[in-house]
Image (cartoon, rainbow, N blue to C red):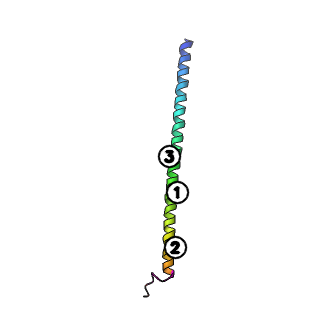
Amino acid sequence: MFGTLHKCLDASRDLWRILLLCFRLWRIYMIQTLKNKRDLYMNVSLKKTKAYGDLYKIMHFYDKNGAFSHND
C-alpha cells in the first residue's frame, strides 16, 4: 500500500514541477512579449514625436520668413 502511495506522491510531485516549469516559461514569454510591444510602441511614438517636431520647426521657419503669408 505504501509503495503505491509513494508512487502517486512522486507522480503528483513531478506533475507539479512540470506545471511550475510551464508557468515560469509562460511568464518569461509574456514579460518579453509585453516588453517588446512596449519598446515598439515607444519607438514608434518617438519617431512620430520627432517627425512632428521637425515638421513644426520647418513650418515655423517658413512662417517666420514669410513663405506662408498671404500678403503677397
Residue name at image x 43 percent, y 85 percent: 70
CA gap, disc 3 and disc 1? 14 Å
- Tag nearer the camera, 2 or 3: 2
Q: Amino acid at mark 2?
A: Lys
For the stretch drawn in magenta, the main secondary structure is loop
Queried whether the magenta region covers residue 67, the answer comes back as: yes
Which residue corresponds to mark 3? 33
Specify the quadrant that holds the C terminus.
bottom left
Residue name at image x 49 percent, y 54 percent: 40
Queried whether the magenta region covers residue 17, the answer comes back as: no
Q: Earlier in the sequence, mark 2 or mark 3?
A: 3
7 or 46: nearer the viewer: 46
Q: Position of residue 17 (x, y in %)?
A: 55, 28
Q: Earlier in the sequence, mark 1 or mark 2?
A: 1
Which residue corresponds to mark 2? 57
Which residue corresponds to mark 1? 42
